[in-house]
Amino acid sequence: MKRHFTFESYMQLLDTFRNSGHHLLTFIDYISNNCDINKCVILRHDVDRAPKNSLQMAKLEFGKGIKASYFFRTVGPAYEESIIEKIADLGHEISYHYEDLSYCLGNYEAAIKNFESNLEKLRKYYSVKTICMHGSPLSRIDNKKIWEKYDFRDYGIIADPAFDVDYDEVFYITDTGRSWNNTSASVRDKVKSKFEINIKNTHHLIEKIKRSELPDKIMLNVHPQRWHDAFVPWASELVRQNFKNVLKRCLVKLRSADYG
């Protein structure tokens, strides 16, 4: 069976969207056009780790004249300034994948100071205007709750996908859990939406696009660390993610029981 979650299959996915008449655009471009583009795919990348994969993906997109939004964490191995600068130089949008509230253990004052500091780090390379929270699955703290006390617009941010996208109009597709829209293996990377569309794998997704079985507006959230052409890193990511999915399913069940 042909492998999916390879760079080759990702580029085939983008080509299929283009051939179907979808405009491929960044999140900031979508927001700047007042969400009025009728048939489009918002290309979003959450850079949780393995930034070299993000650079490889950014170069492939650039080679096809495609721009995407790269949401960078600023802690751990995801934050590599030289790579952020190179991706920005390719014309992609740089955004902040924030996790300040969980990082500061729920201390709101410390978290907003941390947010400002990290935002300024990224703004050395790009005029960051959009943000999106990192799920921090091991923490009980929901990072986007920081905006219950503060307003991100006070910090020069104009949009966050959690608050500024109508998911009854935009179909959200994410590869969290190394499968498509796998809510059982996702703690927080999910949205409330009227759409219930099963996607078995990348090849199945491509076939659905070809058959015009998807909504006109889509947000595609691709985590570059999951995608490899070489077999060894591809297989390593598969094994690693399968193990993480077991843990995530346990977390989802435990927290559902706590709040049930």
Image: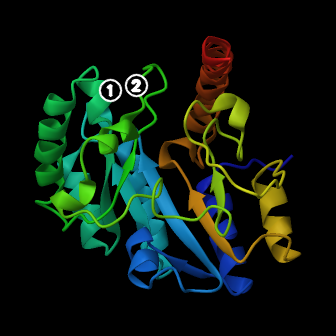
The residue at the point 44 percent across, 49 percent down is 46
Q: Residues within 10 Å of mark 2 (few under 14, many from 20)?
A: some
Residue 32 figure quarter? bottom left
| Residue at image coords 59%, 28% | 236
Residue 226: give x, y in percent of width and height. Answer: 56, 42
Which comes before the other along the chain, label 2 or label 1? 1
Identify the image quadrant of the C terminus: top right
> Is residue 27 visible in this depiction of the protein?
yes
Residue marked by disc 1 = 102
- Element at label 2: loop
In percent of width and height, residue 188 lies at 55, 35
Disc assigned to residue 133: none
Q: Does residue 171 lie above or below 2 as drawn?
A: below
Whether the residues at callouts 2 and 1 have beta carbons within 8 Å, the answer is yes
Image check: 167 left or right of 115?
right
Mark pair 2, 1: CA separation: 5 Å
Q: Does residue 41 sit above or below 80 in this rendering?
A: below
Give the image location of residue 251, x and y in percent.
60, 16
| Left or right: 56 in relation to 16 | left
**Number of marks present in the image shown:** 2
Residue 55 visible in image:
no
* Residue that label 2 marks: 141
Three-letter code, disc 2: Ile
In x, y percent, where is residue 198?
Answer: 84, 51
- Above or below residue 64? Residue 231 is above
> Is 174 situated above or below 186?
below
* 171 vs 148, nearest the viewer: 148
Q: Nearer the viewer, residue 58 or 252?
A: 252
| Nearest the eye: 114 or 168 | 168
10 Å neighbourhood of mark 1: few (<14), some, or many (≥20)? Answer: many
